[in-house]
Amino acid sequence: MTAAYRIAVIAGDGIGTEVIPPAQQALDLVAARCGFTLHYDRFDWSCRRYRETGAMMPTDGLDRIAGHDAILLGAVGWPGVPDHVSLWGLLIPIRRRFRQYVNLRPIRVLDGLPGPLREPGEVDFVVVRENVEGEYSEIGGRLNRGFPDEMAVQEAVFTRPGVTRIADYAFDLAATRRGHLTSATKSNGIVHTMPFWDEVVAERAARHPEVTWCSEHIDALAAKLVLHPSSYDVLVGSNLFGDILSDLAAAIAGSIGIAPAANINPEREFPSMFEPVHGSAPDIAGRGVANPLGALWSAAMMLDHLGEPAAARALMTGIERALADGAVRTPDLGGTATTRELTEAVLAAVPAHP
Ligand code: NAI
Ligand code: MG
C-alpha cells in the first residue's frame, strides 16, 4: 500500500496565498515520482477572516487540525490588524498547543544567490530556536496607563524541562552534522535566566561528548555571524535570541524570500508546522512576483519530517539547480521572473527518477 499523508494547509494572508499553491504543486510532483500521495485540507484562517468574523480561526480550530500529519503555513499578518492579534490568534496557539518547542531554521548560501556574502557552499548552519517559552510570555502587565508614572513589566520564563529539551535537540542535531554547537547567551547582562540557561546547556553537554560546544554572548555572536558565517554549525538560542539570529541569518543567505522554517514537535504527539520565514509582504502582494523558494524549501523540510527523505532531496535538488542556473529569478533575487515562472523552473529541474 502506498503511503498517504494528510496535510492541513493554512495559506494565510498576502503572498502566503501566492507561495502555497506552488509548494503544493512541487509536493505533488515529487510525491508522484516517489510513490506516495498527499491529501490537503485547506483552512482560510487569516487576517481576512479576522476582519469578517472577529477571530483568526474558529474556536475549535486547533482540534480540527490536531490529527493531521503536518501543517503547511504561508504567512499571516495584514495592515489594519495589529500583528500581536495575528500572532497570538493563530501562530502562537498552534506552536504551544501542539508543543512545537523546536523552531528549526537551516541557513545555506546556495550557488547562484546574489547574497551579501560570496562564499557559496561554505555557509551551512542551522539555528535551533526555543519556540514555546522564554521571553515570549504572557506574564506581566501594565500599570497607570496614561499617567506620568506609567509602567510595563514582562517576565521571561525559563524552565528546566524547557531548556533541557531544546539543548538536547540541538546537541543531537549537531552530532548528525559537523559536531559543533554554539549556545547564545547574555549572562553578563541578564543575571537570572541566562546563567540558568548556561548551566543547563553545560549539564546537557556532558551527555554529548561527541559534540564540541561553546557559549557566546548574543551581541558578539550577531557580529561574528555576519563576519564569519562559515564557522558555525548548529546554534541554539532562547525564543527571542533565536528569532533575531534566524532573521539575521536569512539575510546572510541572500534573501528572506528563500529562508525556510519548521516548528517541530519532536515526540510526534501532534502535527509539526512548516512555513517560510517571511511574512505576508503587503508591499508586493497581489503582483505574482513573490519568491516561492522559502515555501518550497519548507515543503522539503516537511517531507523529511514525514519520513520521505528521497522526495525531500529531489525537491531540494530542483531548487538548487534552478538557482544555480540563474536564468529565472524573481525581483528579490535581482531578476524579473514571476512566482509562476520560478516555480516552473524548479519543477523542470526536479530529477526524473529520485
Ligand atoms: P515580510 O517578510 O512580509 O516582508 C519584508 C520584506 O521582504 C518586504 O519588502 C517584502 O516584500 C520582502 N519579502 C518577503 N518575502 C518575500 C518573498 N517571498 N519574495 C520576495 N520578497 C519578499 O515582513 P514584514 O513586512 O515585516 O511583515 C509583513 C506582515 O507579515 C506583518 O503583518 C507581519 O506581522 C507578518 N509576518 C508574518 C510572519 C509569519 O506568518 N510567520 C513572519 C513575519 C512577518
Ligand atoms: Mg522573526
Image (cartoon, rainbow, N blue to C red):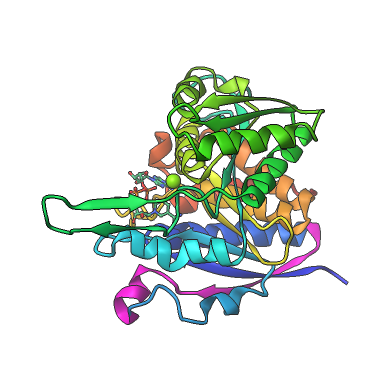
Left or right of 337: which side holds 297? right
Residue drawn at x 48%, y 54% is 340
Which residue reaches farthest right? 1
Q: Say which of 270 and 43 sits in front.
A: 270
Where residue 99 appears, as percent x and y from the top left, is 62, 61
Left or right of 18: which side holds 33? right
Where residue 234 appears, as percent x and y from the top left, is 65, 32
Q: Is residue 175 above or below residue 314?
A: above
The magenta stretch spans which residues?
34-53
Residue 272 position by quadrant: bottom right
Where residue 307 appears, as percent x and y from the top left, is 78, 56
Q: Say which of 246 and 108 sits in front.
A: 246
| Total count of labels | 0
Residue drawn at x 44%, y 75% is 57
Taking the magenta stretch, the answer to whether it contains residue 113 is no
Residue drawn at x 88%, y 72% is 1
One can see residue 236 in this view: no
One can see residue 209 in this view: yes
Q: Is residue 2 above or below residue 253?
A: below
Residue 171 position by quadrant: top right
Residue drawn at x 60%, y 74% is 65
Q: Say which of 162 and 339 sits in front.
A: 162
Residue 96 position by quadrant: bottom right
Q: Is residue 122 above or below residue 275?
A: above
Left or right of 245: which side holds 35? right
Q: Is residue 54 above or below residue 14?
A: below
Taking the magenta stretch, the answer to whether it contains residue 44 is yes
